[in-house]
Amino acid sequence: MDSLDAVEHPSCAALCRPARRWRLPGSEALWLGAALVVLPFASNDFVAYQIALFLIYGIATQGVALCWGRLGFLPLGHALFFGLGAYLAGGTLKAAQQQPLWYLALPLALLLPAAVAYVTARLVFARSHRSGPFFSLITLAMTMLGFLAAQQWSAVTGGFNGMADIPELPGTERYSSFYWVVAACAVGSTALLGLVLRRPLGMLWSAVAQNEDRLQLFGYATDRIKAFAFGFSALLAAAAGALFALHQGIVTPLTMGFVLSTEFVIWAAVGGKASPLGALLGAVFIGYASSELRDHFAYWEVAVGAIFIGVVRFLPEGLAGLGRPLWRRGPAAAPGVPATDAPARHAPDGRIGLAFEQVHAAQGGVRILDGLALALDGPGLRCVIGPNGAGKTSAFNVMTGRLPLRSGRILLDGADISGAAAWRVARRDVGRKLQIPSVFSELSVSQNLDVALWAGRLGPAMSLARAPLGWRSPLRDELLDLFPALREQLATRAGSLSQGHRQALEFVMTVLPQPRLVLLDEPCAGLSPAETHHMIDAIKTVIDRLGAAALVIEHDISAVAAIGGDVYVLHQGRLLAQGSLAEIQGDPAVRAVYAGARK
Ligand SMILES: Nc1ncnc2c1ncn2[C@@H]1O[C@H](COP(=O)(O)OP(=O)(O)OP(=O)(O)O)[C@@H](O)[C@H]1O
């Protein structure tokens, strides 16, 4: 928590860097608000009425852009939540004409669609986080079902003709003052999204899209993070639907249809799926251009299609990409967050014990682990060696939920963790470094460290607070002392680090949450002899400092000797031998296996 740290924090570092370009002061939402205030005076009530409709679509588009542009999964049926919000709000407002108490039920028009979205996403993503394409198809099927239900259930929805005569919001007039309600909501949703994206939750959303596996290995339940984002995006769509019902006075099944769902996607692509303002402007720009062209140009659809193709082809970030230099953007770009001590993690307690009991794993008929049995007890370093394909990485994979276990048991401190998801194992204080260094490429080095430091410390409420952006821990400082090159590159994008620095960064991230059992898969791969020596020293220092147990997969016998501790030799998915390096080297079975081996 020293002053040096405060200077090095990425948000501050970003601030301290000389501005390379002229930038607009204030936020995107502020400028949007100013533009929407001027609009009715610069045009007329009819234009404002039209723009309000496209702003409503834009709010729903912001939800699609959040899922697609930030978290990396594409919802193809967002009109379902738009339509649900519209029907529920419309029905509630009609009922409130008879009984004003119904106004109290209005929030349900937003919350119910959000709940449906959350539960759907939990169910789909709980099975596998690689279910993105299935997720898109399921949301598509859901919106089609919604459309059919809206058409068939005419007693409630009015069927094909729709739910008509929806009253205005008390105190507003549909063709004039309601514009201000819509404008306020558009500014509000843009400001809210901008705020959340600059908070830890926003950084985690970006991290999900960049490297979901890595996030799970820190103990983050990414299916819940994605489900929350989808629920939030559905809330935006439902709010937009409720505004639509008030704006139009009628809701038809088309508001739940596939066509509107795809339009949300197109508007997000044109406006810019990574930017809340871009998504909003995409809907307004294309929507307004379509309505103008429709009146003046017979082939208006061709023109809209050409605009779409042109923007997608030449502006990968959409129209928002044009305005990129004007605003400071990106996750966690919250300037001036004071450095504070991160909350302490619980102190390690009890003995560290790991046991593989006759573990079998296979994939596509290939036997990968064939009755692997090994055990460790207590802190300290051990190495895992074996020829290529012996099953070393697979042993780590089967323990951390990345490879299905066919039979056998894995016990951690006596508890059965066989088949547990990666994030559940990580929450038992297991840290893992992957064979190919795995970091969040688009985040800065410091932001990568933040994500690791938050592991096990960041509750749902804190994920929306600013304070965690300034969290520090003594261990973080010690690790940066061990790897001064990382300290010098805190503001550098992790994706542009050299192989050696990436190895160092992933190692630091792995131990920052203070795991009790550390699994290191070839941490010296690709390092020069001097870097290897330095890495081994760092591993020994840190494991000793944490009082942890560590298993290090290593090929280089001189590195194994430098690391010290017992050695496990794996061969053909089984434990071949175990003992000190001298014992292993004298073992005839090991010598036979290694005869002719590469190292
Ligand atoms: N998901 C999978 N599907 C099919 N085969 C796999 C899978 N994972 C591992 N294997 C196979 O299982 C065997 C063991 O692989 P593993 O990566 O665990 O070996 P290793 O001992 O870590 O080797 P190396 O030192 O080369 O990394 C290899 O033959 C590999 O091709």
Image: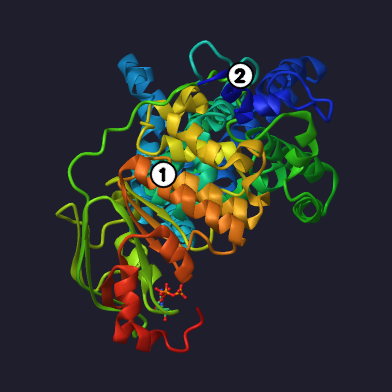
- The structure residue drawn at horizontal position 25% and vertical position 38%, both measured from the top left corner, is 348
The reply to whether residue 74 is visible in this rendering is no
**Residue pointed to by mark 2:** 336
**Circle 1 Cα neighbour tier, 10 Å, few/some/many (<14 / 14–19 / ≥20):** many
Q: Is residue 404 above or below residue 117?
A: below
- The structure residue drawn at horizontal position 45% and vertical position 71%, both measured from the top left corner, is 557
Of 516 and 367, nearer the camera is 516
Q: CA distance from mark 1 to mark 2?
A: 31 Å
Q: Is residue 37 left or right of residue 518?
A: right
Q: Residue furthest top?
A: 171
**Residue pointed to by mark 1:** 542
Of 263 and 429, nearer the camera is 429
Q: Is residue 235 above or below residue 339?
A: below
Q: Position of residue 553 (x, y in %)?
A: 41, 65
Helix, strand or loop at mark 1: helix
Q: Position of residue 215 (x, y in %)?
A: 44, 48
Say whether disc 1 or disc 2 marks the residue closer to the N-terminus: 2
Amino acid tagged 1: Val
Q: Is residue 182 left or right of residue 358?
A: right
